[in-house]
């Protein structure tokens, strides 16, 4: 992957999304409850209405799941410049953000960083 790329991780029942920062690291939303396994980010965050933004190694986020670079909206939207994507992403590290499965999920978060607008076709 290249810095700024959207990473789609195939999890049971849903896809988790992260944004590649470079040097093996991604930024993604995680449960606010540090004890919750990453697999349950959606489940925990649905009930709390919030998530925590973390910078983590791609291999730790992916675990043993399949993943791919998926900048699928590039056909219909213009990505922000890479330097701006990374700067915006890094400004969110360790912050709590609202989480809502339909309007503010992990894909919405990374597409907001990548394009400047929230997009998710997982829930349409």
Image (cartoon, rainbow, N blue to C red):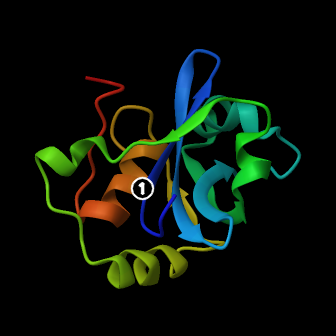
- Screen quadrant of the C terminus: top left
Going 59% across and 36% down the picture, which residue do you hit? Answer: 67
Asked whether residue 105 appears in the rendered view, the answer is no
Where 38 falls versus 81 (above or below)? above
Residue lying at the far left of the rendered structure: 76
Q: Residue at x 47, y 65 (%)?
A: 2
Q: Is residue 56 left or right of residue 96?
A: right
Residue situated in front as seen by the camera: 24 or 120? 24
Quadrant for residue 96, please give it. bottom right
User: Residue 115, how many percent across, how many down?
Assistant: 25, 62
Which residue in the rendered view is the most extreme toward the right? 35
| Coordinates of residue 92 in the picture (x, y in percent) | 53, 74
Count of residue discs: 1
Q: Position of residue 7 (x, y in %)?
A: 50, 47
Q: Is residue 78 above or below residue 23?
A: above
Q: Secondary structure at mark 1?
A: helix
Q: Which residue is mark 1?
A: 110
Residue at (36, 65) in percent of width and height? 113
> Left or right: 24 with respect to 14?
right
Residue toward you, 65 or 43: 65
How many C-alpha atoms fall within 10 Å of the one at disc 1: few (<14), some, or many (≥20)? many
Q: Is residue 37 visible?
A: yes
Q: Quadrant of residue 45?
A: top right
Q: Where does the image place residue 87, in percent across and percent down from the top left? A: 44, 84
Taking the image as shown, residue 9 lies to the left or right of residue 5, namely right
């Amino acid at each position: 992957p290249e810095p700024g790329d959207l990473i789609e991780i195939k999890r049971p029942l849903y896809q988790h999304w992260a944004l590649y920062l470079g040097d093996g690291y991604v930024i993604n939303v995680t449960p606010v409850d540090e004890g919750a396994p990453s697999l349950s980010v959606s489940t925990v965050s649905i009930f709390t209405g919030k998530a925590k933004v973390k910078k983590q190694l791609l291999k730790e986020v992916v675990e043993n799941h399949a993943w791919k670079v998926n900048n699928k909206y590039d056909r219909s939207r213009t990505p922000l410049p890479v330097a701006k994507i990374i700067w915006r992403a890094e400004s969110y590290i360790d912050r709590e953000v609202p989480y809502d499965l339909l309007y503010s999920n992990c894909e919405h978060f990374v597409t907001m960083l990548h394009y400047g607008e929230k997009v998710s076709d997982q829930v349409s």
